[in-house]
Image: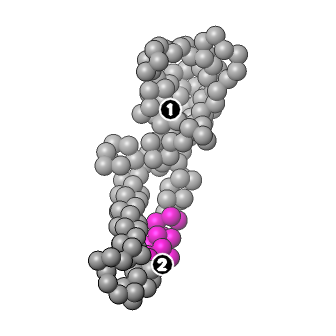
Amino acid sequence: MSDSHDAFLTPEKFEELKKELEYLRTTRRKEVAESLEYARSLGDLSENAEYQEARDMQAAIEERIQHLERVIKEAKIVVGDKKASVVVGLGSVATIQREGEKENRIYTIVGSEEANIHEHKLSYLSPLGEALMGKHKGESFTFTTPNGKQSYKVIEVK
């Protein structure tokens, strides 16, 4: 998340990231330090796979800690505005229908840190998310994907 322009988080995600950071700083750092200590005790470090693995794990954890610290510091907390639920924005839950299809798709619009298509959390920077931003209930819109143009209609905004 080196792009500081996308630090939008829901209050839930913000708390989740703070908990993960605390866990990494305390428990995980200690576990890795113990693994390193154990690996060192095995002797020759140049051919010691356990030592190399522990060093790699330590580097990955430190990198994640730095990332989380940056995200938390730059985060803008987004709370869905109930009055503004006529327009799709960050934190909105949008129900959309693809042209020519019967079933609806429901997505929550989130920042990229939170995006997870399996949980129907769509980044506002994704092609569909960007196309949805600012749309009203009943409005149709089209956007371009690698597979060509897609047309949708906004069924509901919460």
Relative to 113, residue 64 above or below: below
Q: Is residue 83 visible?
A: no
For label 1, the SS is loop
Relative to 110, residue 99 above or below: above
Viewer-side residue, 144 vs 84:
144
Q: Looking at the picture, which amino acid does disc 1 mark? A: Gly
Circle 2 Cα neighbour tier, 10 Å, few/some/many (<14 / 14–19 / ≥20): some
Circle 1 Cα neighbour tier, 10 Å, few/some/many (<14 / 14–19 / ≥20): many
Q: Looking at the picture, which amino acid does disc 2 mark? A: Glu
Position of residue 29 measured from the top left corner of the image (x, y, whole percent): 43, 75
Outermost residue, front direction? 47
* Residue located 60% across and 29% down the image: 94
Which residue is under mark 2?
31
Left or right relative to 128: residue 94: right
Position of residue 24 measured from the top left corner of the image (x, y, whole percent): 46, 70
* Residue located 41% across and 52% down the image: 75
Answer with mark 2 or mark 1, whichever residue precedes in sequence.
Answer: 2
Viewer-side residue, 39 vs 9:
39
Distance of mark 2 from mark 1, alpha carbons? Answer: 41 Å
Which residue is under mark 1?
89
* Residue located 49% across and 26% down the image: 128
Write the start and end of the magenta stretch as one range: 19-33
Nearer the camera: disc 2 or disc 1: 2
Position of residue 38 measured from the top left corner of the image (x, y, whole percent): 43, 85
Relative to 77, residue 24 above or below: below
For label 2, the SS is helix
Corner quadrant of residue 71: bottom left
Q: Main secondary structure of the magenta part?
A: helix
